[in-house]
Image: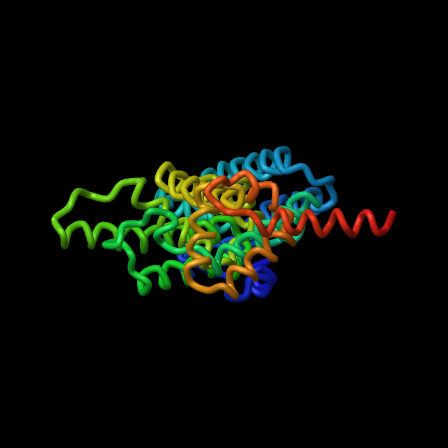
Amino acid sequence: MAAATAGALGSSSSATTAPLAWHDFLERMSHPSASDFVKSIKSFIISFSNSVPDPEKDSAAVQEFLAKMEGSFRSHNLWAGSSEEELQSAGEGLEKYVMTKLFNRAFASLPEEVHSDEELFEKIALLQQLIQPENLDIKPVFQNETSWLLAQKELQKINMYKAPRDKLVCILNCCKVINNLLRNVSMASKDNPPGADDFLPVLIYVTIKARSILHSCIQICYTYNGTGVSQDWFQKQHISSQIFSQQCLSSGTLMHNLFQWMKRNSRRKWNLLKQIFWDYQLIRKVKEMKPIKNSWLKKKKRQQGTEKKTRL
């Protein structure tokens, strides 16, 4: 199993499952006395792969299996005398192996998840061209493109990994980069420590600019990975930024700011933006924003009315 596992995972080892710990897990699982473990793992993977996708039941099944196996590790001679840290690493190694094998079955397994991915990608692609730090009320003192680029790169690594824990560490690293930026700026200016109101807007901006984060990546982390309190908080913060990205196109305040910014910068961009929003069938939202002059909408409606009469 060790050779097969290593070959299947390739270079997927990450900071969450350190190379030495991962190698140790594979070595122990290749021992003859671990044959029952190997059979149980293979049996679970086959059974899970052949079942009908149901995220809630799937999550419960995976967590139950991992907990059962980790309990067996503790009472087995292969881990006799192991420290709590070594036992935890073994559990992480098992999770990494199982979820890597089940990735194609667990990732975006439902049509609605695929649709959510496509919808979110389109919205973020649009926002990426338009949004500015000022739209999210990010304080000028916290606006640092160099640090934001580093955070974006950490976030973009999420698609390199298959195991939920490995994906989650990419989110955690991104959050740490942002948190360090905010803390260093506050310390330098002898200001109050930054809070969630400072952190979340920057995370939202970085997420939009990174663009590589899919709904399913977050979903698989949320569904299949058991986390500690601090990791869970960072994960929920990032999910919040994803939800914002999905919903912000229907936010009157943000859309109004974006429209005004585009109008100030370029008439050509403004005209292009109008066409984009028309194509995205967001006219209803635009019409609800009273601060925006919508004479072009009236003109468009008149044109449609004329075309309709002509057809009749």
The reply, left or right, for residue 261 in relation to residue 281 is left
Q: How many marks?
A: 0
Quarter of the figure that contains the N terminus? bottom right
**Residue lying at 51% horizontally and 63% vertically, measured from the top left:** 269
The reply, left or right, for residue 57 in relation to residue 33 is right
Q: Does residue 23 show up?
A: no
Is 56 placed above or below 5 here? above
Identity of the residue furthest to the right in this view: 312
**x and y, in percent, of residue 151 in the image:** 37, 58
Could you say which is closer to the camera, residue 205 or residue 68? 205
**x and y, in percent, of residue 118 in the image:** 63, 52
**Residue lying at 60% horizontally and 46% vertically, measured from the top left:** 282
Write down the quadrant of residue 131 in the picture: bottom left
**Residue lying at 61% horizontally and 48% vertically, measured from the top left:** 297
Could you say which is closer to the camera, residue 154 or residue 63? 154
Q: How is the image coloured?
A: rainbow
**Residue lying at 47% horizontally and 49% vertically, measured from the top left:** 165
**x and y, in percent, of residue 229 in the image:** 37, 36
Could you say which is closer to the camera, residue 116 or residue 246? 246
